[in-house]
Amino acid sequence: MLGDVLLITEKHQKAGEAIIEHILNNPKPKMMIAISGESGSGKSELAHVVAKGLRQHGIMAKLLHIDNYYRIHPLERTEWRKQNGIQNVVGPSELDWETLNKNIKEFKEGKTSTGPCVDLITEQIDQLTTDYSGIDMLIIDGLYAIKTEDVDVRVFIELTYHETKKAQVVRGKEPQNEYRMQVLEKEHQEVQALKPTADILIGMDYSLRFAK
């Protein structure tokens, strides 16, 4: 997403290094990593650290933010959710999985791909074209990223929105009003339901452990 603010700290660096080590020990061609967690948990920061660190090992990784794939335009989403009921519509079904899977297929085939990219400043949806011929790995981050099919490594950050309120305010997320709290609670329920599918769990203190 264009205009996103990253707050990378030492904890992100340490967790990222551990994930990179795991990747290097388990290499695959056209590998895909997915990072899920609740709003403000550090998904984008961790994805950035991993992608940048992999380049030092000669691995070109591209970031794919799942927030770019919402079916409803950012300027219309709040009203759409209110009209249709937050409990009814907030969740993975809000995403355009067909376009996401198409872009992933183009990555796997090393083709040039065009997909949506939200500009957080203008709140408009641009189209971003990427040449995947020289890209070795795709790192997908977002609330429901680990729900993506054919992912090789699924990472889940256990921080909930209760612990990340400060990060959300600093990064300029939606105002913390009653509507936003209802959305966060529904997202909390949907994201936590994905936790059992994770291969790697990032704890509250950003310690890393492998799921059994």
Image (cartoon, rainbow, N blue to C red):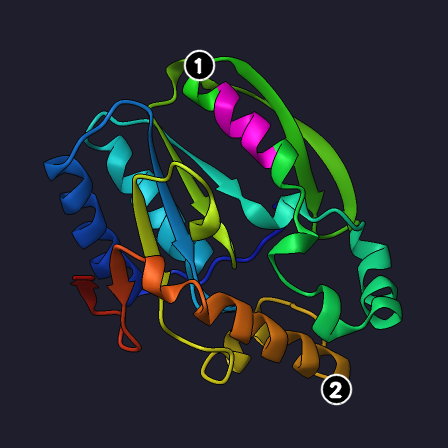
Q: Quadrant of residue 181?
A: bottom right
In magenta segment, residue 105? yes
Indicate the secondary structure of the residue bearing disc 1. Answer: loop
Which residue does the image show at 67% across and 42% down from the upper left?
96
The kind of residue on which mark 1 rests is: Gly
| Nearer-the-camera pick, 110 or 95 | 95
The kind of residue on which mark 2 rests is: Glu
Residue with the mark numbered 1: 110
Above or below residue 70? Residue 26 is: above
Left or right of 17 on screen, residue 78: right
- Give the class, few, some or many, for how many residues have Cα within 10 Å of label 2's Cα (few <14, many ≥20): few
Residue 7 screen position, x and y as percent: 44, 63
- Determine the CA span between mark 2 and mark 1: 44 Å
Residue with the mark numbered 2: 178
Above or below residue 54? Residue 89 is: below
Above or below residue 200? Residue 114 is: above
Mark closest to the chain's N terminus, 2 or 1: 1
Q: Which residues are magenta?
A: 100-106
Residue 33 screen position, x and y as percent: 35, 42
Query: Can see residue 151?
Result: yes
Residue 174 screen position, x and y as percent: 70, 71
Left or right of 54 on screen, residue 121: right
In magenta segment, residue 2? no
Q: Quadrant of residue 87?
A: bottom right
Q: Main secondary structure of the magenta part?
A: helix
| Nearer-the-camera pick, 147 or 205 | 147
Left or right of 101 on screen, residue 193: left
Quarter in which the C terminus is drawn: bottom left
